[in-house]
Image (cartoon, rainbow, N blue to C red):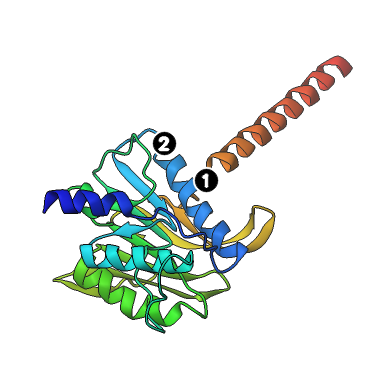
Amino acid sequence: MLAELEALTAQLPEEDGRLMETRRHHCQMDLLIHALHHAWRDRQDFWVGGNQFVYYSEEQAQAVIREVKAERGEAPPPPEGFRAYRGPDFFVVRGVDGSYSRQKWVVWQEGGRYPDLIIELLSPSTRSKDLGEKKRLYEQVFRTLEYFVWDPFDPGQFQGWRLRNSRYEPIEPDERGWRWSAVLEMWLGPWEGVYDRERAVWLRFYDAEGNLVLTGEEAAERRAEAAEAELARLRARLAELERA
C-alpha cells in the first residue's frame, strides 16, 4: 500500500497551465500572499499557497491525473461536466515547516494536515461551486477552520464562515465591513487603492489594532517616503538657520 501511494505521489501534476479568471483575480491572490509573507517574515512555522494543487485522497488524485493527461491529449476526456477538485485560490496551514518550498500540497505527505484557512475568489463561472460544493468539502472533509469568499469585481459578495461544532457558522462583519480571522489573528476587509498599477477595491489584511498589513514592497516605499520627508525637513531647517 505504501509503495502504491509513493508511486501515485510521483505522478501528481504540479500545474495545469490554466490561468486565473482575470488579471485582477491573479493580482488579488498575489497581494494576499505577499502581505502575509511580509507580516510573518520572521516565522518559519506556516505555509501559504496560491492557486496551488491540493491533494487529499487517492481517488481525487487519480481523477486529477486523468484530467490533466486528457488536457494534454494523453488520455480520453472525463465525463462531460465533471472536473476534479484541484485546489483553492489562497490557503494557509499553520504549525508546519515553512523553511522549504512546495510545488503542491499533498495531505498524506504533510502528516494529514489540511488548510486552516481558505479564501476563494469568486467569478461568474465559479461562484456556485465556491458557495456550494467547495464549501461543503472544506466544512465536512478538510475541516478547514475558516473559509472566506471575495469577488474582486463585487466587494459586496464578501462572506466568511468559521467551523464550530462541525458546521460552518457565518463570521459577521463589524461596522467597517471587516471580518476577524482567529487563524491569522488579523482582520480581513476591503481596501480601495492601487496595487500593481490597478485601482480597485481589494481584500486586505489588517492587524488587531486596525493597521493595514503591508506587502514588503509597500513597506519599502513607505520607508523611502518617510526618509525623503525627513530629508526635506532637515533641509528646510538648515535653510532657516542660514537665513538667521
Whether residue 75 is visible to the viewer of this picture, yes or no, is: yes
Report which quarter residue 99 is drawn in.
top left
Packing grade of label 2 (10 A; few <14, some 14-19, many >=20) is few
Kind of element beneath mark 2: loop
Image quadrant where one finds the N terminus: bottom left
> Which of the marked residues, 2 or 1, is nearer the chain's N terminus?
2
Packing grade of label 1 (10 A; few <14, some 14-19, many >=20) is many
Which amino acid, by three-letter code, is at mark 2? Answer: Arg
Q: Which residue bears the numbered disc 2?
A: 41
Which amino acid, by three-letter code, is at mark 1? Answer: Leu
Q: Is residue 17 left or right of residue 129?
A: right
Q: Residue furthest right?
A: 243
Q: Looking at the image, which is closer to me, 233 or 174?
A: 174
Q: Which residue bears the numbered disc 1?
A: 214
> Residue shown at 23%/44% (left/top)?
95
Q: Is residue 68 left or right of residue 56?
A: right
Residue 228 horizontal/vertical position (percent) = 71, 30
Q: Looking at the image, which is closer to me, 243 or 228?
A: 228
Residue 130 horizontal/vertical position (percent) = 39, 75
> Residue shown at 37%/82% (left/top)?
79
Q: Residue furthest left?
A: 1
Q: Is residue 43 left or right of residue 1?
A: right
The answer to whether marks 2 and 1 mark residues whose Cβ atoms lie closer than 8 Å is no
Residue 157 horizontal/vertical position (percent) = 47, 77
Identify whether 233 is placed above or below 119: above
Separation of residues labelled 2 and 1 (CA atoms): 12 Å
Total labels: the figure holds 2
Q: Looking at the image, which is closer to me, 215 or 121?
A: 121
> Residue shown at 52%/53% (left/top)?
30
